[in-house]
Image (tube, rainbow, N blue to C red):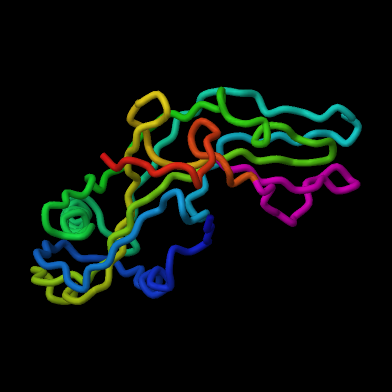
């Protein structure tokens, strides 16, 4: 199973193109490339904070993050600045050029709201040992579409490289349509003064996918 901070070197190239856009419609998308987060690998950069618990060292039995339901909004993103109709235009181009091509219809590149419940997940995400600070989070799986803009009414945008990202849906174990993603938990030690240490490390909890099913065993269905 693969976890990575950056999806690919291409993201690093596009990330530097944080350019303000003038109002302009573009009709061409060239040099198209695409990929997606999934069971075999995903970016930890999309981590969404859900909960946190510091377990005092004096508590010899340990602590537990309460099980609950969380509301999440997963935003679609661009690596360049665009608002309103301009952004919609670019996301539409990104969506239409995502995937293997003929007869493939990509999910819409939109912001999605969802709920995730920790009721059924493994204790590994919720148990906190004495003297440990644990953060519980959710990592949404994203679609990534790369391309160069063309045929723009503002000619300065022609050949500008764009990366568009958006969450997608899958069916959970109860056959409900939910935003695809994985549970995650990070832990670090509490210092002798009682403060949380600055060193932030993974707890090794990247094993959950929705209802604590091993990520490596799931192949999500894109809707």
**Split into 4 quadrants, where in the image is the C terminus?**
top left
The picture places residue 69, in percent across and down from the top left corner, at 51, 24
Picture quadrant where residue 112 is located = top left
Q: Is residue 199 magenta?
A: yes
Q: Answer with the quarter of the image where residue 115 lies.
A: top left
Q: Which residues are magenta?
A: 183-204
Q: Is residue 135 left or right of residue 38?
A: right
Is 186 displayed left or right of 24 in the figure?
right
Residue at image coords 66%, 49%: 204
Spot occupied by residue 51 in the image (x, y as percentages of width and height):
61, 34
Identify which residue, 81 or 219, lies in the foreground. 219
- The x, y position of residue 189, in whole percent, is 80, 47
In-image side of 147 versus 192 (left or right): left
> Where is residue 111 drawn, in percent x and y?
31, 42
Q: Is residue 167 above or below residue 1?
A: above
Q: Residue at x 87, y 29 (%)?
A: 59
């Amino acid at each position: 199973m693969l976890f990575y901070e950056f999806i690919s070197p291409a993201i690093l190239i596009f990330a530097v193109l944080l350019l303000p856009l003038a109002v302009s419609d573009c009709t061409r998308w060239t040099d198209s490339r695409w990929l997606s987060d999934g069971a075999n690998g995903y970016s930890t950069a999309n981590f969404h904070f859900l909960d946190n618990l510091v377990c005092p060292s004096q508590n010899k039995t340990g602590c537990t993050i309460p099980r609950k339901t969380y509301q999440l909004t997963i935003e679609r993103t661009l690596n360049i600045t665009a608002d309103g109709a301009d952004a919609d235009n670019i996301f539409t181009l990104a969506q239409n050029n995502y995937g293997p091509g003929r007869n493939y219809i990509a999910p819409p590149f939109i912001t999605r709201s969802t709920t995730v419940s920790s009721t059924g997940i493994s204790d590994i995400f919720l148990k906190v040992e004495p003297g440990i600070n644990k953060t519980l989070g959710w990592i949404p799986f994203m679609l990534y579409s790369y391309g160069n803009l063309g045929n723009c009414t503002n000619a300065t945008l022609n050949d500008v490289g764009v990366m568009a990202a958006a969450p997608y849906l899958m069916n959970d174990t109860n056959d409900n349509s939910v935003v695809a993603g994985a549970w995650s938990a990070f832990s670090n030690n509490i210092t002798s003064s009682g403060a949380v240490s600055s060193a932030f490390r993974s707890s090794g909890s990247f094993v959950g996918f929705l209802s604590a099913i091993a990520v490596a065993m799931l192949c999500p269905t894109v809707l």
